[in-house]
Image (cartoon, rainbow, N blue to C red):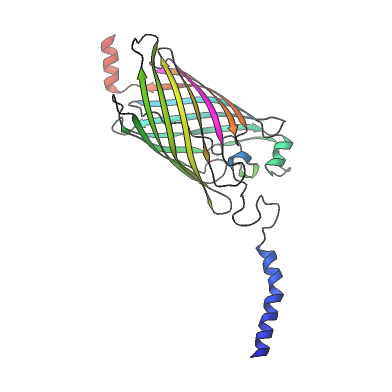
Amino acid sequence: MKKRSVFSLGIILLLSPATVIMAQPQGDLPYNIIGDPSGTAPYFFGPYAFPVPDILKNTVKNVTVGLTGEYTLGSLTPAKDHTAAVGFSVRLPLWTDRANLSVYGQFHEWYRDTPESRIVRRVSDKYALDGHCAGDVYVSIDMRLLSEKKYVPLVTLRAALKTASGDDYEKARYFDAPGYHFDMSVTKTFHFIRRGFFRSVSASLNTGFLCWQTDIGCQNDAWMFAGSVQLNTKAVNLSVDVGGYYGREKYYDSPQSLKVIAEFLPDKAVSPLFIYQKGLKDWPFEQFKIGLTYTIPSPKGLAEMYHGL
């Protein structure tokens, strides 16, 4: 019996070093052991890997289609990298203006990295610095829980799914993994007593939960937060939004940004749009968007418009 015990102990001691070696991650991975950062924080990817979500301020009663041209400067290193993209959005009322189906994302992007940014992102130098790829698509259900009244704010709830349609994971452009987020917004509008050019001022607060799959088989959980102040006029609706989310990765996993959004001719069927976004923390980008939003009138809306003519 003692000989068997000694023999078993010898086998265990002999195999232990091999077991330890096999348990260690092989190659140049951005993490060491379970619980360490996976390297899939948005900081180390392109600007559309999982950007700070826009605040849902209301639902729409008519079909709305948007198209944008976008340009982003990356400041991960002193040498700037560049990304151009074509974005889209479609919002459809679901039998009522209290609930919408929204589909949005990037059709395609074109990028040019720098050798310095590739080193930080741990991308192999065998890949060309420039290229193009498809983007992620998001699908959400947007609901208006409460309509605004004198003492009651507007309350919206959104459930959004991020698909894994984005390409070039090996070049650190997209996660190549699904994700989702749930968030709620509360908005209160204060109307000017004398409504002329200036109509109202709105304030919004947003909070929620966001997550995505990382490359080590775990999901990154994050708490979302945002706030907005918007000035509404006859010619333009101008808003300043600050928001972000806090993930569970240990490093560079709290992306935050400032957005300035100008929606021109808000009462028209075709409304020009301009958005400027600047990363405040863990989102090393400066972004410019220009586009058009087209609102398709409902049959009732068309009848009212023709009657007015």
Q: Quadrant of the N terminus?
A: bottom right
Q: Is residue 60 left or right of residue 213?
A: left
Q: Position of residue 237 (x, y in %)?
A: 44, 18
The quadrant where residue 128 appears: top right
Which of the pair 236/72 is nearer the observer? 236
Q: Is residue 254 visible?
A: yes
Q: Quadrant of the C terminus?
A: top left
- The residue lying at 29 percent from left, 18 percent from top is 302
Q: Is residue 187 left or right of residue 163?
A: left
Q: Position of residue 290 (x, y in %)?
A: 53, 21
Q: Is residue 40 above or below residue 96?
A: below
Q: Is residue 302 above or below residue 147?
A: above
Please give the range of residues in magenta.
Answer: 246-270
Q: How many marks?
A: 0
Q: Position of residue 88 (x, y in %)?
A: 48, 29
Which of the pair 92/243 is nearer the observer? 243
- The residue lying at 36 percent from left, 26 percent from top is 188
Q: Is residue 173 visible?
A: no
- The residue lying at 70 percent from left, 39 percent from top is 118
Which of the pair 117/305 is nearer the observer? 117
The residue lying furthest to the front in this view is: 151
Residue 194 is covered by the magenta coloring: no
Q: Position of residue 301 (x, y in %)?
A: 29, 19
The quadrant where residue 217 appears: bottom right
Residue 263 is covered by the magenta coloring: yes
